[in-house]
Image: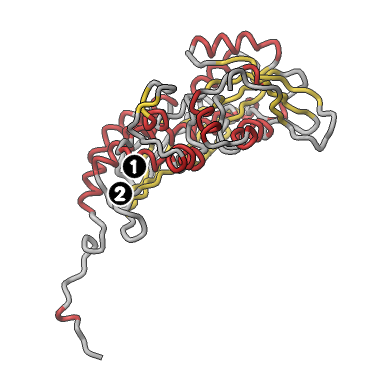
Amino acid sequence: MTDTSANTPHATYAAAGVNIEAGDQAVEQLKPYAEKAGRPEVMAGVGGFAGLFKLRLDRWKEPILASSTDGVGTKIVIAQALDVHDTVGLDLVAMVVDDLVVCGAEPLFLQDYIAVGTVVPERIAALVKGISEGCVRAGCALLGGETAEHPGLMADGAYDLSATGVGVVEADAVLGPERVRPGDVLIGMGSTGLHSNGFSLARHVLLDICRMPLAGHVEEFGRTLGEELLEPTRIYAKDCLAVVAEADVRTFAHITGGGMAANVARVIPPGLRAVLERGTWTPAPVFSMIAQRGRVERLEMERTFNMGVGMVAVVSPEDVDRTLAVLTARHVPSWVLGEVAPAEDPAAPRAELVGDHPRF
């Protein structure tokens, strides 16, 4: 075999597609955003091998740590097509911290993971800007993360996001199905649109079937299709904690993948059922457009999208007015969505939508 190595250029990491200098530039650009999303318990800045967070044991008698990991899904395709990247950073935080608060946990910190085909410092900075703003809205710290460059595995302009969040709740204050009682009331909290679920179906209907341009103005939305689809997910963490401080909350249900009935069923114990009244709210126009133009059946819509409800609180009947007052004061659309009743059939679903939506 002939040795040709003497005529071969020296191989380098950069030639293989990894730009260490660009990664360093990205870190420098994102530092101000990471520092903005801080808390007094954070003990180290961006750049260390591990993030340090001092748990204040003087504040908690018996602290229970809660953790959650999630991503943004195919909503990223829309962000990449429009070259708008900060909004999906907000989405990422919402998906994680609003899972934490379901059990009553206060979000403490979040760490992100960004996988890219090629590091573009400005794009990474935009993503982290959104993540930072989301952490500020949730009251948690951005405790570092990782940006990984994957040439040959991902296209140059492609990226994906995920994050893990950690929260804390007092042991005797953990919310969950075991607290739910017959007669409890379900309070719906309005979503800001699709949030971060169902985008594969939404894109199929609006972009593939209907050929609607992302930059095109849509009268029903009062803005472009792209702006509607990239509307950030509402972050409910502080709102839910404010309700917990003022009312007898049994638990929450974060309405994400699987739709409302499936997610509410997760927090209803055996022997009970949640009856959710469609007639108590009207889904936003984006939902009716997808349903009508894609000829999507109602049950398929309801198991794919949040249908206008991003979070559900299960509260004692005595605290319904108090819960609604707290949410109204915090500018969160909210209403009585249904109630918890004994299950006549043990095999029946633990949550069911009944009735019809007005004007849908």
Residue located 74% across and 32% down the image: 350
| Residue 76 image position (x, y, % from top left) | 40, 41
Residue located 68% across and 23% down the image: 276
| Residue 274 image position (x, y, % from top left) | 72, 26
**Nearer to us in this view, 171 or 356:** 356
Please report contact status of discs 1 and 2: CB closer than 8 Å, yes or no. Answer: yes
Let me know if residue 307 appears in the view.
yes
**Nearer to us in this view, 58 or 152:** 152
Identify whether 84 is placed above or below 358.
Answer: below
**Nearer to us in this view, 224 or 271:** 224
Horizontal side of residue 118 vs 77, given as left or right? left
Callout 2: SS: loop
| Disc assigned to residue 29 | none
> How does the figure colour the protein chain or chains?
secondary structure
Q: Residues within 10 Å of mark 2 (few under 14, many from 20)?
A: some
Identify whether 155 is placed above or below 240.
Answer: below
Residue located 17% across and 71% down the image: 10
Q: Could you tell me the amino acid type at mark 1?
A: Gln
| Residue that label 2 marks | 157
**Nearer to us in this view, 268 or 30:** 268
* Whole-number angstrom distance, CA of label 1 to CA of label 2: 8 Å
Horizontal side of residue 6 vs 83, given as left or right? left
